[in-house]
Amino acid sequence: MSDKEPLFSAKNRKLLTNPLGSDNPITVQVLGICSALAVTAKLEPAVVLTISVTAVLALANVIISLLRHTIPSRIRIIVQLVVIAALVILVDQVLKAFAYDVSKQLSVFVGLIITNCIIMGRLEAFALGNRPWPAFLDGIGNAAGYGIILVIVAFFRELLGSGTLYGFQVIPQAVYDMGYENNGLMILPPMALVVVGIIIWVQRSKDKSLIESN
C-alpha cells in the first residue's frame, strides 16, 4: 500500500468483504470448525466468542505487521504464539471480570483461541508481509467472516433447539400448547456440522466459482 493510497481503497475494502463470502474462513477455507461445533448451541456465547476472536486477530495482525522486519524467520511461529497468547489472556481476564457467566459457558474455548488456525493462518499468510492498516482490515474481515457463520449456526440451533434467542423466549407458549416441541437434536454438537454443511451447500449453489476452484 503506497503512502497516498486511500485507507478504504477497493483493494482494502476487499480485505473486509471477501472473507464474508467468497473467501469465508469456515465455509470456503474450512478453518475454525471446532469452535463452530462447540459454542453455537446458544447465541450469546457465539457472539462473545466472535467479539473475542475479532479483538485477538485484529490486534495480533497489527502487532506482527509492525514487527515483521525484526522477527527472525526461524522463530516467527514462536513470536506469533506469544503475541496471540498474551492477547488471549487479556481477553479471558476481561470476560471473567465483566461477563463471568458467559466465560464459564465458553470454558476452554477462549484459551483455545491461541491455537485457532484462522488466527495463525492470517498472521503467517498476511500480517508478516503487509503493512499494519491492511493487516488490521484483514483481521477484522476474517474475524467477521468467521463470526457471521457462528452467529447464523447459533441462531438456528438455539431457536429450534430451545425456542429462545439470546436467552429470551421467542416461541410463544401458545405454539407449545398446540403441540409444538423443541428439537433436542439441534443442541447436540453434530447438528452444528449439519447446519454448517447446509450453509456451505447454499453458498456454493449460488456461487459456482467456489465449486470450480475446488
Image (tube, helix red, strand yellow):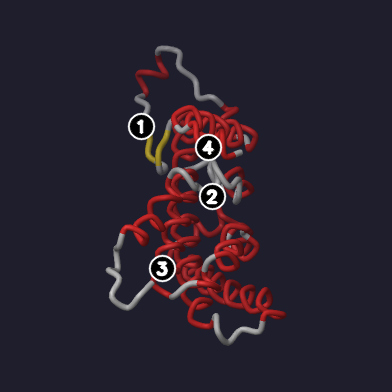
**Label 1, residues with CA under 10 Å away: few <14, some 14-19, many ≥20:** few
Q: Which residue is mark 2?
A: 25
Q: First in sequence, mark 1 or 4: give its number.
A: 1
Q: Regarding mark 1 in the picture, which secondary structure is present there?
A: loop
Q: Which residue is mark 1?
A: 170
Q: First in sequence, mark 2 or 3: give its number.
A: 2
Residue 130 visible somewhere in the drawing: yes
Q: First in sequence, mark 4 or 3: give its number.
A: 3
Q: Quadrant of residue 80?
A: bottom right
Q: Residue at x 28, y 75 (%)?
A: 4
Residue 194 position in % (x across, y down): 59, 31
Q: Report, in whole angstroms, how far the alpha carbon at label 2 lies from the one at label 1.
A: 31 Å
Residue lying farthest right?
Answer: 74
Three-letter amino acid code at the position of disc 2 = Pro
- Residue 34 in the image: above or below residue 208: below
Q: Regarding mark 3 in the picture, which secondary structure is present there?
A: helix
Q: Report, in whole angstroms, how far the alpha carbon at label 4 lies from the one at label 3.
A: 25 Å
Q: Nearer the observer, disc 3 or disc 1? A: 3
Q: Which residue is mark 3?
A: 134
Left-right relation of 10 to 20? left
Marking on residue 210: 4
**Label 3, residues with CA under 10 Å away: few <14, some 14-19, many ≥20:** many
Q: Report, in whole angstroms, how far the alpha carbon at label 3 lies from the one at label 1.
A: 40 Å
Residue 200 position in % (x across, y down): 53, 34
Three-letter amino acid code at the position of disc 4 = Leu
**In contact (CB < 8 Å): disc 3 and disc 1:** no
